[in-house]
Each structure stands twice: as C-alpha cells, then as structure tokens.
Image (spheres, rainbow, N blue to C red):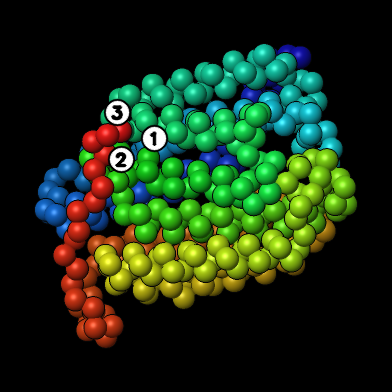
Amino acid sequence: MGLGRLIVNVIRMIRPDYWPKNLFVFIGSALAVFYLQQVSPINGCLLWLGFRSLVALVIAILAASANYILNELCDAKTDIYHPIKNARAVAAGEIAPVLALCLWGLFAVAAVAVAVLVSRVVVVTTLFFLASGFAYNVKPFRLKDIPYLDIIAESFNNPIRLFLGWFAILDSFVPPLSAIFAYWMGGAFLMAAKRLVEMRHLGSPTRAGQYRKSLAYYNKENIILQMFFYATMTAFLLGVFIARYHVELVIIIPLLAACFTGYVKAAISAPIGNEPEALYKEKWLAVLLGLTFIIGAILLFINLDFMRRIFNIQKPVLPPLWPTAGM
C-alpha cells in the first residue's frame, strides 16, 4: 500500500466528517461565561476566553479521533457483517492492528499534551473522554454490546464535551448538574434514533445481532419508547435549569420541540437501507438544531424582565456550584 493510500485510510479512521459534533464544547464555554458574568462583569478578556474555547475544541477533536480509531480497531471482526463498514481500513486488512493501536496512542497522547497547557481539570476531563471510549469499545467492558447501556454510554460523550468547554473557561467549579444531565439525555435521544435507523439499514435482525450484540435485543417499539423516555427526561431537566438560572431560555422550547419531532419523523420514515449517519446529515434538521443552539446562546446574555413577570419568577440569586478541588 502506497503512502497516499495510507494517508487516506488514516484520515478516514479519524472521521473528520464527525468533527462538527465537537463544536458543542462551545455550549459549555457559553455556560461558563454566562455564570462568570452573573458573578462579576467580564471586561476585556473575551478574546482570551474565546482562544481557550478553541483549544478545548482541538482537545475534543484529538480525543474523539483517538476513540474513533479504537472503535475501528475493536470492531474489525464485526464490521465484516456490515454492508458499508466492512470496507473500513482495519476490517478490510489495509491497516494492521498494530499500526492502528499506534495511531490511537498518538492521538490520545496529543489530546492530553494539549490539555496540559490548559489546566489540571481539563487533563482529567480529557482522560475521562479517552476512558469512556475505552470502556465503550474494549473487552471485558465493551458497553456497546450491552442493550440500553450502549445508548447511555455512547451519549455520555456529549456532557464530556460540555465539561471540556466549561473547564477551559472556569475550572474551579462543576457546571450546573441540570444542564449536564439535560444534555446527556438529549444525546441519548439522538443515539436511540440512530439505533432505529441502523436496524432498518441492516434489515435482518440476525444480521444486526452479528454486527452488534445489543441490536439483537432491540425492535422498533422498544427503541421508540426509549426515544420518548430520553426526550421527556431532557425536557424536565432543561425546565429545572431554565427555572433556576435563566427563564429567558423558555423561548427556545418550541424550537427544541420541533427538533425532537423532526428527528423522530426522520428516524421512523428513513428508507430501509439508509445509513444511520444520514440521520445527522438531514440539512433542515441540522439547520434547525444549529439555529436553536445559537438563539439559546444569545438568550443566555439577554435579560427580559417581562418574562419573569409573566411566569412569576424572581430574578435568581446564582447559587454556588460544586467545586472541582478534589479533581
């Protein structure tokens, strides 16, 4: 195999088309800036905070890429049962497992090295990101083979990204737990939707079980029930955050409801044989989701007194957060 082919395979292994998921570190950074603004006005350091957020993005990309390489390495034996993933470099025998392992180590070390430049707490968070990928993919843990837990475990990367963005700005306190769990449950909803499309893509339940053990336990009914559960959990937890911290965010609730409804429709009506990742490439859904997050980020820094009067909610006194002193 020539050098050019090797480079192409490595680029495919780190999945740059998945990197936009890491943009959600900016949600954590926006929340941290919001909290700091309530404590004392931020003057003249927004560029520095923005730079630290970009560094957090780089860390997330490197750590996620390491996890993608590990995923391909550990899934090589089962990817042969997948109509598309059987062409992945390790499964197809184009990259040796030893080389894949070295690449994983390279990206993992790079992620930690950049994290060292930020803070000790960011290093711990980065290690946790890498550990979650290890527990998800590697035996004897291999959480991806355990039904229901596979969705919870895979979606946990969402709050980890939030942590990275937050700790890059404010590493002395943990972000509000209501925001963390709401974001986690929202990610679990999307993972459940992806599982539904994945099962339709594979067609035969036997084939689905050969590719991933957890899929043998799923059917359309129990996946839709999971989606309903995670959407409900997200709504309640987000409601706690809005009522406790910033009632103005209630404005994005209709947009979030439209996002959830859109993803349910896209998952249920996805053509048989459609790739699971196509769910995230629905342009109108991606635009709607992006618009929702942008409006939400703007609303964090806007005070609308009339909304507190409408909902009869007093202006909150920002509560103390859990410290990170033990990390």
Looking at the image, which residue is at 51% across and 72% down? Answer: 257
Point out the residue furthest to the front here: 140
Amino acid at dot 1: Thr
Q: Which is nearer the eye, 247 or 180?
A: 180
User: In which quadrant will I find the N terminus?
Assistant: top right
**Could you tell me how far apart the alpha carbons at marks 2 and 1 are, in whole angstroms?**
9 Å
Q: Can the viewer see residue 115 in this picture? A: yes
SS at circle 3: helix
* Label located before the other in sequence (2 or 3): 3
Give residue 151's position: percent from left, percent from top: 61, 50
Q: Is residue 99 above or below residue 243?
A: above
Q: Earlier in the sequence, mark 2 or mark 1?
A: 1
Residue that mark 2 sits on: 167
* Marks 2 and 3, how far apart at CA: 10 Å
SS at mark 1 in the image: helix
x, y percentage for residue 233? 49, 65
Horizontal side of 244 relative to 231 (left or right) equals left
Q: Which residue is mark 1?
A: 125
What residue would you read off at disc 3? 120
Q: How many labels sit on residues? A: 3
In the rendered image, which quarter contains the C terminus? top left
Q: Residue at x 59, y 71 (%)?
A: 261
Residue at position x 46%, y 75% from top?
A: 254
Pointer 2 with pointer 3, Cβ within 8 A: no
At label 2, the amino acid type is Phe
Q: At label 3, which amino acid type do we have?
A: Arg
- Marks 2/1 in contact by CB < 8 Å: the verdict is yes
Give 117 or 176, whichever is nearer the viewer.
176
- Mark 2 lies on a secondary structure that is helix
* Mark before the other along the chain sequence, 3 or 1: 3
